[in-house]
Amino acid sequence: MWAFIVAIIASLLLASPTAVNLPIPTFTTAPSTNSGDTPGVDETPKPDDVTARFLGIGQMPDLVGISAVDAIELAEKSGYYPQFFQEVSGELDDIYYTKDETDKLAGLYVCTQTYPVGAAIDGTSWQLDLKLVTSSSCAAKTNPFRLGTQKISAGDWEPKSYEYGQELAEGWVFGYTGYVKSDLKVVQVMTTLGVKEMQLAQIEPTADGSDCDFTDDELDANHKTASEVKQQLLPIGQPVSLVLDGSGYEETSYFFHKIDSVGAFTEGNPPVNSVNEQLVKTGLWTVDSSVYKLAPDYVKPTMQKYKIDKSFLGDAALDKQYAARMLKAANQARRSGVPVMKSCLREGDKTFIAFWGKSDARGDNDSGGSVSGGGGGCTWVNGYWRGWHHVSGYWRC
């Protein structure tokens, strides 16, 4: 067979007056960093700065700053299947695409990813919850959320391994939710297992109090202000240490403490100066009405103080220390001149006076709940509703 082929080539060369030089094509192949690449993944060569980001199957690569099209291949090669989003008018919209529709992602670059670089995710977690926010302005953006050997400097801080519901957790502030009431307490934290939504324990926006009376526009404005001060105290990228709320009310409800680049507390050791406490001190936030109650009911709101409903607190000494600090901060804030606080107290006084028919501090006439009798110069006033607020029964002496 080979003799036959050689004879044909020799006859062609002899028949040609001049020799023909055929160019030999050359192919550049990116170096492989893993011998067990995922079957079926397109091995189209990529620039070195993109290819070098592959760490291994089940290890989160750095996708931030590269094109969305390149991110698809790199993520899938690592064992993840990403969802893409783009911000439109302040909201994140899904970008739906198929393998044949990657043109929808043309010109977009990855701004954020919901797992830290170097995170090792077991097989059961692959392909889940990898969300990539994209924009045309994020080319070459750097990713600060890194673990292990992927840290920029070996001495950089990294959070301890995260488990759901653990008493002490660590991470970086990643983002926030919107201005909706139910979302205001939430802070997105980048943990070793990706972005988790944590709640600020035992606080709520002051504007949501039962004595407040705001229009929808006023409420939105107050929520926005409360959200802004939260973001100022917890900027994106801030390392945080979290202490679980001992009440057990929510397994993702924490007291937030800021730490520095080596993991040291910057504003005092827990329970001192938690972000929760600092927010209450602003007057824009107050303590959670399910844990802290205003008392007594028979005086005007401007004269009331918070007390602790101990049934909602944990038994540990640290829980009691947090509660004492939160209580003090909340009662001091009620005397502040913050507009939202003054407005709520003023409306509360109006409701009190209209119901009791007196403008003094004590509403000790016969209005309110029905009287059930008593003795020793005192009468028992049954519980009743004041607007949307239930007033518990009490002795009037």
Image: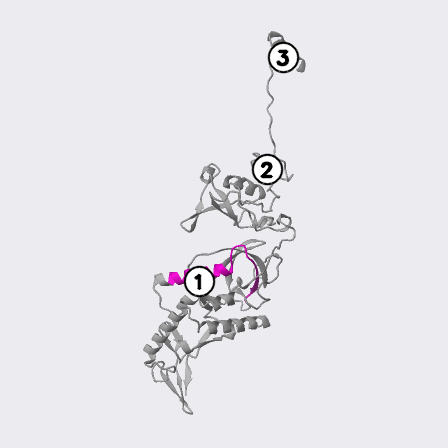
Q: Is residue 182 visible in this depiction of the protein?
A: yes
Q: Residues within 10 Å of mark 1 (few under 14, many from 20)?
A: many
Determine whether the residue tagged by mark 2 lies in a helix, strand or loop. helix
Identify which residue is drawn at 50% across, 58% down: 187
Task: Reply above or below: 90 against 350.
Answer: above
Identify which residue is drawn at 36% across, 75% down: 349
Residue 347 lies in what quarter of the image?
bottom left
Q: State the residue position of label 3.
A: 9
Q: State the residue position of label 2.
A: 48
Q: State the residue position of label 1.
A: 226
Q: Magenta segment: does it hold 239?
A: yes
Considering depth in this image, is 395 or 54 the residue closer to the camera?
A: 54
Of callouts 3 and 2, the N-terminal one = 3
Of callouts 2 and 1, the N-terminal one = 2
Image side of residue 366 versus residue 264, left or right: left
Considering depth in this image, is 180 or 246 the residue closer to the camera?
A: 180
